[in-house]
Image (cartoon, grey):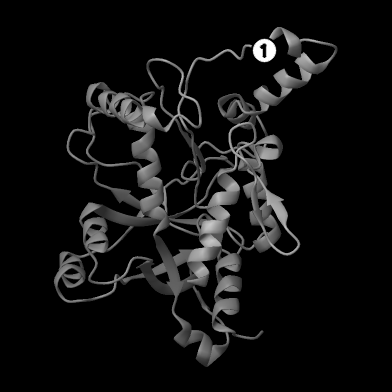
Amino acid sequence: MTNVCHFLCSALSTSAAPYYFKPFRRGIPIREFADGALHANLPVRAALREMKRLWHATTNLDALVSVGTGIQDHEVQLPNVARIGGFEAVCKTFFNSLDTEATWNDFTHEREYSAELHHRLNVPIDGDYVGLDDYKAIPRMLQSVESQDRNTSWSPHSYLFRLGIVVDRLKASLLFFEPDPSLAAEESTFLRVGPAGYELRGTIRCRLCKSSDSLGLLVDSIEDFSQSQRTSSSSNEVEGHATWTTIKFSDALRKDVRTSDAWLRVPCILKSRDKDTEHTVAVRLRKPLGAGASGTSLTARIPISGFPATFGELEAKARQRWNVGD
């Protein structure tokens, strides 16, 4: 019950949009809580700052997805009584801060923006302008969006295409690499040194629960896994990798996950020339029927959670997780 209360309070606080709803009041002494629209109506930068504050440089971002409330044409009309002194400029500044599409566009031109990691989903809403508190317009908005889904092709600039990219990215983020702790228990290291460089043994795993329908659907959508080392300075996650080595994902393993109440465990040995060369483990996914308009039924290679990363970074994380000392 306490958790429900906490969630309810958070929901009421963040829903208390200025100009539309009253602030949410709670606590002893009573405090007022309101949505952060005036400070960060599109809190992308705030989310990235919070991630760095919590995890510093030890955690890779898998994906950031910003979901808008609809694109609408609307010009704010101020009453004449408000057009006095500098108040009109203040009002325009306020309403401009609510324009999340413009804010996102500004963000895409900043240095920290990555087209592979940062995504925006927002659809045009046809018809008359819908205010934030106009709940009676919800059926019309749903009809408008569903109509676009039915009538939009899978072209690279369509909403459905962008949605598909986000879905694939989130699927890939459910998969991660777990080093084998047995070697560290014996030799206090996760890395083996061979004639061709370093080896890191482990398994590709999934965050979804075993025996779940969701895990079965994900396994069915996986075409293959592969690994590669970066050979150029390209800023793209998967460009700059000259060759990709397939990681075996057998039909027998798929069947075990689907029918034998087994966790997803794909054994693999990662190999690298040195500890500081960036390494990527990636997955290719099968596209749903009708989404292969570009002539291919597979997605491009998408890094799984935690990649790209160097062997040094992977071992440091494994040491922290398994509490292995130097």
The kind of residue tagged 1 is Leu
Query: Is residue 62 placed above or below 97 in the rendered structure?
Result: below
What percent of the width, then of the height, locates residue 89? 77, 16
Number of marks present in the image shown: 1
Q: Residue at x 43, y 67 (%)?
A: 177
Residue 273 can be seen in this image: no
Q: Which residue occupies the foreground of this view, 290 or 285?
A: 290
Residue that protrudes farthest toward the top in the picture: 80
| Residue drawn at point x = 55 percent, y = 78 percent | 321
Which quadrant of the view contains residue 50?
bottom right
Q: Secondary structure at mark 1?
A: loop
Horizontal side, residue 263 vs residue 271: left or right: left
In the image, residue 123 lies at what x, y percent?
A: 41, 27
Report the residue marked by disc 1.
78
Q: Quadrant of the C terminus?
A: bottom right
**What x and y, as percent, mark residue 4?**
48, 65
The image shows residue 141, relative to residue 270, as above or below, that is above
Q: For this rendering, which residue is in front, 74 or 287?
A: 74
Residue lying farthest to the right in this orientation: 85
Whether residue 320 sits left or right of residue 282 in the image: it is: right
Q: Is 3 drawn above or below residue 169 in the view shown?
A: below
Residue 206 occupies quadrant: bottom left
Residue 293 shows in this picture: yes
Mark 1 crowdedness (10 Å alpha carbons): few <14, some 14-19, many ≥20? few
Between 159 and 228, the one lying in front of the other is 159
- Residue 187: where, in percent of width, then height? 55, 89
Position of 258 compared to 271: left or right? left
